Image: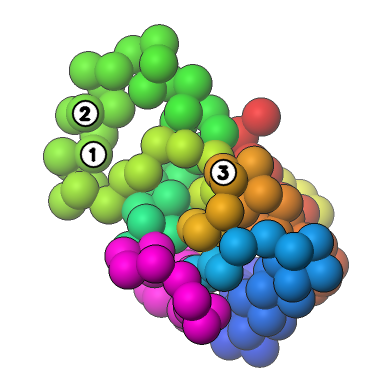
Amino acid sequence: MTELTLEAAQTIATTALKTAREKSFKPLSVVVYDARGSLKALLSEDGTSIKRAEIAMGKAYGALALGIGSRALHKMATDRPYFIASATHAVGGQLVPVPGGVLIKDGQGRILGSVGVSGDTSDNDEIAAAAGIEAVGLVFDTGA
């Protein structure tokens, strides 16, 4: 696979939500971007709090923009807060440096896109994102 298809993006998003229901997570929003940063899928469950989709977008877009999973961005925010503040400005505010923004990679390590999930704990958001990516036979990179 050289690009992230609409079908794959939809499967990632629906599987992330299915995983969340199986694990009794709080209601989630899931966003999927392709490698160009184009929105491929966005789903928000009934009962999500307002702005959850935007937070998911910031997790995914920030990971994609910097080429590292948002778990690594979280560590950077602690270790180098001025860098993360500057990077957030550079990407138009679309950077949320907490886990739940996961890169989608192919078997050769090429970035095909990213997934952002928001609604539960950041760790649980990340679990849902990873499950979605695995469901389409691709590799997830959380930045751990």
Q: Is residue 76 left or right of residue 13?
A: left
Q: Is residue 71 left or right of residue 73?
A: right
Q: CA separation, marks 2 and 1?
A: 5 Å
**Amino acid at circle 1:** Thr
Secondary structure at numbered mark 2: helix
With respect to residue 129, does 66 lie above or below? above
Question: Which of pointers 2 and 3 lies earlier in the amino acid sequence?
Answer: 2
Q: Are marks 2 and 1 in contact (CB under 8 Å)?
A: yes
Q: Residues within 10 Å of mark 3 (few under 14, many from 20)?
A: some
Residue 74 visible to the viewer: yes
Residue 138 visible to the viewer: no
Q: Residues within 10 Å of mark 2 (few under 14, many from 20)?
A: some
With respect to residue 85, does 120 lie above or below? below
Return the residue at label 1: 88
**Amino acid at circle 3:** Ser
Q: Nearer the viewer, mark 1 or mark 3?
A: 3
Specify whether residue 33 is painted magenta.
Answer: yes
Q: CA separation, marks 1 and 3?
A: 19 Å
- The residue shown at (58%, 45%) is 121
Q: Nearer the viewer, mark 2 or mark 3?
A: 3
| Image quadrant in which the C terminus is located | top right
Point out the stretch of residues depicted in magenta: 31-53
- The residue shown at (32%, 45%) is 95
Q: Is residue 93 left or right of residue 34?
A: left
Question: Which of pointers 1 and 3 lies earlier in the amino acid sequence?
Answer: 1
Q: Residues within 10 Å of mark 1 (few under 14, many from 20)?
A: some
- The residue shown at (29%, 27%) is 84
- Checking the image for residue 122, the label placed there is 3
Residue at the far top in the pictured view: 79
